[in-house]
Amino acid sequence: MTQTKPAFWYGIPRGYLQLDLAPSSERFELLAEQVLGLPAELREKADQVFRFYAGVLMLLNQQQVQGCAMGLHPDGCGGILSSVITVSSMSASGVDPKLVIAGLVKSADQTPEKHIQPLELPCGTGFLFEEERITTAPGKPSDGTDELLEGTIWQGTVAVPAVASSEIVMMQLVTSEVDFVDDYRNVLLGFASTLTFTDPSLVETESRIGDSAAHVRSPFG
């Protein structure tokens, strides 16, 4: 898969593990060999996880997701809270991305279960869209039926128009831990605050040049 140079940068929140969305064929072959080498009683479940992982990667790449990370955090009662953050971009070629976001805001504003909030981020103005909805849950019913399980998830999305392009950056957090929505909203807002359209490596280089120049000048006042 062709990797394009990103037009934006961001930081991963603490407690999240970033997934490799474009693993090499050698890595897939190694994973397959590891699955085949497991004892028979573990091989079937590991094979299901492996196939699920491959399917998720395909789905994320089809949706042009540039970044994905899994979050695991203690709940304070001996349990673990899970969530997923993704970063993607949508092109607004030929149209002002701010107008596209305005259209998204107008559409979401007509949906009662969606909440919209404007944001002033270090990189510019963005919008937070959040909603709770019912979706398919993992696992099987305890009664042995073939019916799909359902559960409630919270989905928060921050949309930010790019500074020098027609892209709209979408930063999203999804979790089934709806009792901790306030905490996850803060995580998403903190995540969005790291978004920048300036290459950090250039900033670091300029900073080092500035420090060196100051060091040279300092003996002379």
Image (cartoon, grey):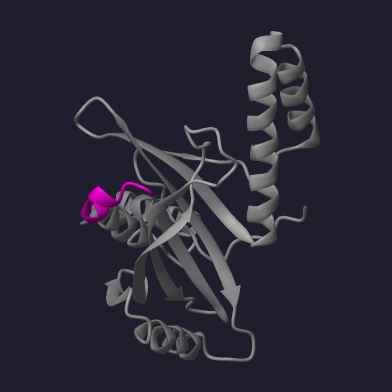
Report the front residue among 20 and 152: 152
Report the front residue among 169 and 205: 169
**Is residue 81 shown left or right of residue 202?**
left
Q: Is residue 167 above or below residue 65?
A: below
Q: Quadrant of residue 105?
A: bottom left
* Percent position of residue 1, x then y: 77, 52
Q: Quadrant of residue 111?
A: bottom left
Q: Is residue 23 above or below residue 182?
A: above
Quarter of the image with the C terminus is bottom left
Residue positioned 43% across, 59% down in the render: 134
* Percent position of residue 69, x then y: 48, 45
**Is residue 219 visible to us here?**
no
**Is residue 134 visible to us here?**
yes
Report the front residue among 136 and 160: 136
Residue positioned 53% across, 90% down in the render: 96
* Percent position of residue 78, x then y: 24, 25
Question: Residue 161 magenta-drawn?
Answer: no
Q: Of all residues shown, which one is farthest toward the top? A: 39
Report the front residue among 221 and 7: 7
Q: Is residue 196 above or below residue 106?
A: above
**Is residue 92 shown left or right of residue 109?**
right
Residue positioned 20% across, 28% down in the render: 77
* Percent position of residue 205, x then y: 46, 54
Write the start and end of the magenta stretch as one range.
176-183
Magenta segment, principal secondary structure? Answer: helix
Question: Residue 179 magenta-drawn?
Answer: yes
Q: Quadrant of residue 80?
A: top left
Residue positioned 64% across, 60% down in the render: 5
**Is residue 132 shown left or right of residue 99?**
left
